[in-house]
Amino acid sequence: MKVLLVNTVPTEKNGITNVIYNYYRAINKQDIYMDLVTINTPEASYRDEFLQNGGRIYTLERNLRHPLHYIRCLSELARGYDILHAHGNSATMVLEMYAAKKAGVPVRIAHSHNSNCKYHIVDKLCRIPFYAFCNARLACSSEAGYWLFKNRTFEILNNGIDTDKFHFEESKRLFIREKLGWVDCKIIGHVGNFLEAKNHVFIIDIFQQLFLRDVSFRLLLLGKGEKMEEMKDRITRMQLSDKVYFAGATDDVNDYLCAMDIIVMPSLHEGLPLTLIEEQANGLPCIVSDVITREADKTGLLEFQSLQTTASAWADRICKIVLSEAERGEQSVQAIESIRQCGFDICGQADRLKEFYKSLLK
C-alpha cells in the first residue's frame, strides 16, 4: 500500500504537522509505504524522520493565486500511489484532490482539522469541485467534519497523542520555574502559534487583569508566528515585559506544561486542538472559548467561557480555579486514563487509520 501524505500548511511546529508526525511515528509500517509532500522546506529533523524510516519528502510551492504549476507537479508525483491523504482546513484541498484524480489515484482523502478557515471566499468557490474530486473524508471532530463536508458522510479520527510523554513530573516543574525565576508564582500558560485565530491580544488583556488582582501571576507563551513581535510590543507598552516569557517553538512542551498552573485558550476558531489533549494529560485545568468543540473535554478539566464576556470576567474565573488545591500528579494520572479510554491514545488511533486505508482499497 503506497500512501502520499500532503500537508497543506507549513511543515513546522503547528497542530496539523504534529498530527501528521504523531500518526507517522505510531503507525505499523509493515506493508505500508508513506511519503510526504510539504509546501515549505522543513527543518532537518522533520526531513530525517521520514528518510530514516524509508520514506521521502517532496517540497512543492503551493500558490492559491497560481495553482496550475502546483497541480501539474503534484499530479506527476502522485502517479503510482494507492492513496493521497491531504491534511488541511478548507475546500482549497480541491487542488490536491484534482491532482490525485488526474494522476489516477483511486483513493483521495481530505482530512479536516478546523471549523473555520482564513480564505472564506476562495473556500466557497472551491466547494463544488472539491466535493466532486474527494472520495473519502476524515475529520478531527464532528464540528470540523460538518464545517468542511456538510451533510456528506465522514469518519472522525481522533488527534491521538503519546499519553506517556505528557504526564506531570514535579522535577520538571521545579526545573522550569527555577530557570525562569518564578518558583513561587502562579503561571498562566498558552501553547499555540501567534496567529489571528489564537486571539493573543485577549490573552494579554486577561493577564493584565490577573496581574492587577495579584502581582504573583506570570504569563508563559509557547509558539512562534507572524504576530509574535506585535504581542511583545503590546506587553512592553503595558510595562509587563518582565512578567511574561516567550518560550518560542520548543521540543520541550511537556516540561513547560509541568511548570504551569492553568491553560488559557480564547481561540476565535479551532477544530479539536491537539494541544488541549496534551494539556489535559498533564493534569492542567484549562479555560477555553466556547467556540471550541465540547468533544475536546475528555477529563472534566476544561471550562468553557464565552468570548462575549470581558477579560475581567475570564480573570475572575482563572483566579478561582488557580486557588483550588488540586493534587496535580494524581490529576494527571486520572486524566491520562480517561484520554486512553476515550480513544485519544496515538497507538490505537494509528491502528484505526491503517484499517481505514485498507477498507478503502477493498
Image (cartoon, grey):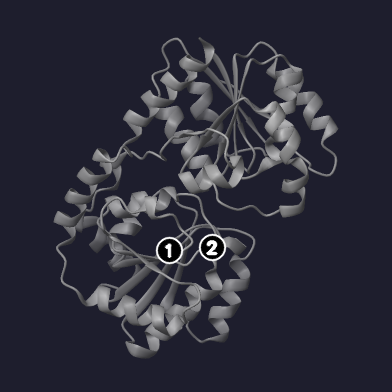
In the picture, measured across the screen, residue 218 lies left or right of residue 149, that is: left
Residue pictured at 41% horizontal, 73% vertical: 219
In the picture, measured across the screen, residue 121 lies left or right of residue 162, that is: right
Residue pictured at 28% horizontal, 76% vertical: 185
Does residue 51 appear in the picture of this structure?
A: yes
Question: Which mark, residue 198?
Answer: 2
Residue pictured at 58% horizontal, 72% vertical: 231
The single residue placed furthest to the bottom in the displayed view is 212
Packing grade of label 1 (10 A; few <14, some 14-19, many >=20) is many
Identity of the amino acid at label 1?
Answer: His
Nearest the eye: 138 or 241: 138
Q: Classify mark 2: helix, strand or loop.
A: helix
Q: Is residue 224 above or below residue 206?
A: above
- Camera-nearest label, 2 or 1: 2
In the picture, measured across the screen, residue 52 lies left or right of residue 60, that is: left
Q: Which residue is mark 1?
A: 190
Q: Classify mark 1: helix, strand or loop.
A: strand
Query: Number of callouts in the render?
Result: 2
**Image x and y of residue 235, in percent:** 53, 79
**Image x and y of residue 133, in percent:** 70, 27
Between the C-alphas of marks 2 and 1, the distance is 9 Å
Mark 2 vs 1: CB contact within 8 A: yes
Does residue 60 appear in the picture of this structure?
A: no
**Image x and y of residue 50, in percent:** 52, 25
Identity of the amino acid at label 2?
Answer: Lys
Snapshot quadrant of residue 134: top right
In the picture, measured across the screen, residue 93 lies left or right of residue 187, that is: right
Packing grade of label 2 (10 A; few <14, some 14-19, many >=20) is some
Nearest the eye: 32 or 126: 126
